[in-house]
Amino acid sequence: MPSPNLRALLGSLVVFLFVLADHVHVVAANRGQFGVHYPIKHHKPRFTAGPWKQAHATFYEGGAGTFEGYGLETVALSNALFNNGLSCGACYEIKCVDEPQWCKPGSPVLAVTATNNCPPNWNQPSDNGGWCNPPREHFDIAKPVFLNIAEYKAGIIPVTYRRVPCQKKGGIRFTITGNPYFNEVLVWNVGGAGDIISLQVKGSDKLKWTTMSQMWGQRWVTGAKMVGESLTFRVEASDRRHSTSWHVAPKTWQFGQTFEGKNFR
């Protein structure tokens, strides 16, 4: 028969094993809740401003370029910045520098949205007329807003610039044009990174998730049948964040209409 000391030792061991088993069960349950069965979602960080860089800028007589709704605060990008049109919608801050006779006092900062391309001029040298020739990083700015940072007599000015998050009012806009056999969607008023690298559309009936093709800038096209279905759009920005606008266009939508969806914060 076990001695009293041995019985006490065995009793303590049983209690220890019981508590340990319960602790392991709780830890396993938590791992199952937070690690295995229900993984924690990691949201991508919001788009942030980039470093200041050197470039040059000129002005053009005009307004909103190829985009709707941007007013005069627009800019055309040289090919070195344009990214085959995918940079349309990106936002920049620009300052005139190193030319006190032309730069406005106080070095005001100009906030603009990229809406167009400044094409190369191969008939002119890059340092005398061919300002947008590769590999130059160059901004061609609408004249009324160019005058906020420099005198127009300057013609061309040295600037510093940086990419910044786009601050837009309201949601992403989707303007649908084309015809039943060729659908075109212009995506604009995008917050955050501002520039879209992918667009998908889904209907409420037969149209499954369909990746649209970039036509030019932020104009995306597909031959899939969209007419007669409520439409959902999913955009992917250049910072790899996604935004899905569910059923923003009703079944009765018409070509030429614009619909407002969910924007990036």
Image (cartoon, rainbow, N blue to C red):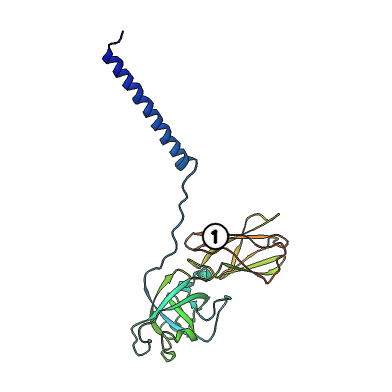
In the image, taking residue 214 as reference, residue 54 lies left or right, namely left
Where disc 1 sits, the SS reads strand
The reply to whether residue 136 is in sight is no
Taking the spot 35% from the left edge, 90% from the top edge, the residue there is: 101
Q: 248 or 67, which is in the foreground?
A: 248
Q: Position of residue 130 (x, y in %)?
A: 45, 83
Q: Residue furthest left?
A: 5
Dot 1 crowding, Cα within 10 Å, few <14, some 14–19, many 20+? some
Instruction: Report the label total.
Output: 1
Amino acid type, mark 1: Ser
Toward the bottom, the furthest residue is 153
In the rendered image, the quadrant that contains the N terminus is top left
The relative height of residue 263 versus residue 160 in the rendered view (above or below) is: above
* Viewer-closest of 66 and 230: 230
Residue 48, image x, y percentages? 42, 65
Q: Nearer the viewer, residue 70 or 133?
A: 70
Q: What residue is shown with label 1?
A: 243
Residue 235: image quadrant is: bottom right
What x and y, as percent, mark residue 21?
39, 28
Q: Is residue 252 above or below residue 93?
A: above
Residue 212's quadrant in the figure? bottom right
Which residue does the image show at 52% across and 70% down from the upper left? 84
Q: Is residue 138 left or right of residue 186?
A: left
**Where in the figure is residue 106, as x and y percent of width and height?**
35, 84
Give me the residue at 51% from left, 71% from top.
168
Left or right for 168, reference 223:
left
- State which quadrant residue 226 falls in: bottom right
Residue 46 shows in the view: yes
Identify which residue is drawn at 41% across, 84% down.
Answer: 149
